[in-house]
Image (cartoon, helix red, strand yellow):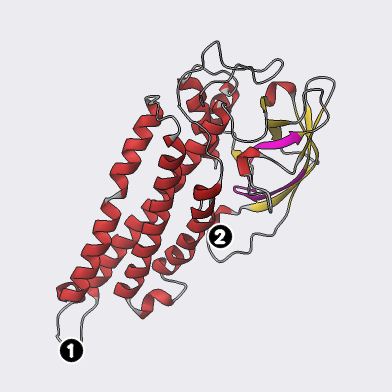
Amino acid sequence: MHLVWTGVAKVFSDRGVPGLEFVQDGAAAGEVFAFGISEAGNDLVLFGSDTEAAPREDGSYSFTGTKIFTSLAPVWTKLGLHGLDTTSADAPKLVFAFVDRSDAVETLDDWDTLGMRATQSRTTRLNGAVAASDRVVRRIDPGPGPDPIIFGIFSVFEILLASVYTGIARRALDLAVETARTRRSKKSGTTYSQDPDIRWRIAEMSLRYEALPPQLASISRDVDTLTDHGARWFTLLSGVKHRAVTMAKSVVDEAMLVAGGGSYFSRSELSRLYRDVLAGMFHPSDPSPRTRRPRPRCSGRRPTPSDPSPGPGLPRRGSLA
């Protein structure tokens, strides 16, 4: 999730949108950025929040609420998050900002999961955690809308997730090949790599995997080159993520069968990959919101003077026209 924020900072920089230079500078200096967006029961995700964002006289905001799946929980130094301002004169406004680790931030030790254990994505309770005025990045209307913070987070998040699960598939495929070369059939006396059924199974796994890297390279290039896909951005991004996680799950399933019963032991690397790949279906966007959620019109372009302002004292928005 650290890379999500550094990626969003690049999206801003590429489009001439100020406001996240401190993320790039901080990352270079060793800061660890965590992602505080997910909330239990909030299927609006980026478009709304149950966390209270209370404005203060000096332009800062205090945040009170609970965030879930906060990866890097034991080690992060800066938490990028959002909350809802319901008290300002122009309320409601969705506020995106960054807070430091402090006594107002409580990290629970509750990451007791089937897989993804290494991420330590614990629950985070915010008890009036303050984001300084120069760390309040955007104030925007709730819901889908034309702001680079939405396009930046969504594009980087979906592409990185798709890349991670494509990598899991690649590793599972490699392990399946290695195992087939060493397992020997008592019946035939040959290794499993010579079994036609096993060879067919591995070939099918490879065909599924090979379809994803070109898609990831293409959509990543389109984000970097400011390609204007308009309203298609939502389906392109959510689609590549969905295809990656479903592909990865099917490849790992087949790899387990190729490897045999030994892969069921917890000491097996394939066992870990099997647990981890299951998490892919829970990351947004899953198939349900892809079909029912309002789609923001994402252009990925540079902002223009005609774009509406994100709020007093904040840079003009643009990337989603």
Amino acid identity at mark 1 = Lys
In which image quadrant can residue 196 be found? bottom left
Q: How far apart are marks 1 and 2 (CA)?
A: 39 Å
The magenta region covers 65-84
Task: Indicate left or right for 238 with 99 as reference.
Answer: left
At mark 2, the secondary structure is helix
Q: Position of residue 288 (x, y in %)?
A: 53, 54
Prevalent SS, magenta region: strand
Q: Which residue is depicted at the point 73% across and 54% down? A: 108
- Measured as percent of width and height from the top left, residue 250 is found at 36, 64
Q: Is residue 178 in view from this perspective?
A: yes
Q: Residue tagged by mark 1?
A: 187
Q: Which mark is residue 272?
A: none
Mark carried by residue 117: 2
Q: In this view, does 221 lie to the left or right of 134?
A: left
* Residue type for callout 2: Arg
